[in-house]
Image: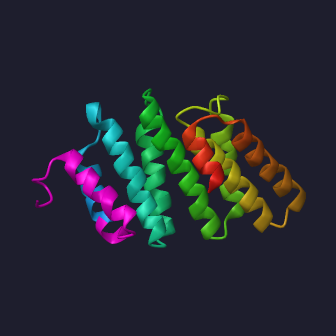
């Protein structure tokens, strides 16, 4: 189907399939189109996921500044949304922003972004936010290690290990195995 004619869910599935095959340019085109189509309302869950995947594809293409801009736009647009799935996309966008900041050599900024996310995350490790929480903890540890703050990095890595050990969900066990 031609972009613009294809329905939103089909476009999202095709974009996801391209991501899984590491075809980030094609995925980027689809997710950007989807994000343009869907701005708010009932489609906020798909739109926020499209923006999240847009930022991810940009980062995989080493276009980190653009990825950070998309992540910031997602946070601005959906950061106050009350739906858990939308907020999970916001949380992962902040994690991915942290990863892009690390890739750009801006470790202190990455630590700040991820710590801010962790400060407002729910304490229940087995939630929809599990992946974002543990990924943010890992980004903090990784950035601190690259900033030669070994003691802080070791403490942060211990927090990641504790979170993985405490989790009981299947998704968390998969994350710990990775």
- Residue at image location 43% in from the left, 35% down from the top: 85
Res 21 quadrant in image: bottom left
Q: How many marks?
A: 0
The one of 45 and 159 positioned closer to us in this rendering? 159
Residue 90 point in image, percent of width and height: 49, 42
Query: Looking at the image, what colour scheme do you see?
Result: rainbow
Q: Nearer the viewer, residue 29 or 158?
A: 158
Is residue 87 among what the camera can see? yes
Quarter where residue 102 is shown: bottom right
Judge whether 155 appears above or below 65 on screen.
Answer: above
Residue 42 in picture, x, y percent from top left = 27, 31
- In the figure, 74 relative to 146: above or below? above
Q: Main secondary structure of the magenta part?
A: helix
Q: Is residue 1 left or right of residue 77?
A: left
> How far across and down, in percent of the image, does residue 93 sit?
50, 49
| Residue name at image x 32 percent, y 64 percent | 18
Which range is magenta? Answer: 1-26
Q: Is residue 173 above or below residue 71?
A: above
The residue positioned 78% from the left and 53% from the top of the image is: 157
């Amino acid at each position: 189907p031609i972009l613009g004619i294809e329905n939103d869910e089909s476009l999202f599935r095709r974009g996801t399939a391209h991501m899984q095959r590491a075809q980030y340019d094609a995925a980027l085109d689809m997710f950007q189109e989807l994000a343009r189509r869907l701005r708010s309302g009932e489609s906020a869950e798909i739109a926020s996921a499209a923006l999240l995947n847009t930022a991810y594809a940009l980062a995989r293409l080493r276009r980190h500044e653009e990825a950070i801009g998309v992540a910031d736009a997602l946070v601005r647009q959906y950061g106050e949304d009350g739906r858990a799935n939308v907020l999970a996309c916001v949380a992962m966008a902040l994690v991915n922003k942290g990863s892009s900041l690390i890739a750009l050599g801006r470790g202190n900024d990455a630590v700040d972004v991820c710590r801010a996310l962790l400060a407002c995350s729910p304490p229940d490790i087995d939630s929809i936010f599990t992946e974002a929480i543990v990924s943010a903890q890992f980004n903090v540890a990784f950035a601190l290690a690259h900033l030669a703050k070994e003691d802080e990095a070791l403490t942060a890595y211990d927090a990641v290990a504790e979170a993985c050990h405490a989790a009981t969900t299947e998704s968390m066990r998969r994350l710990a195995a990775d």
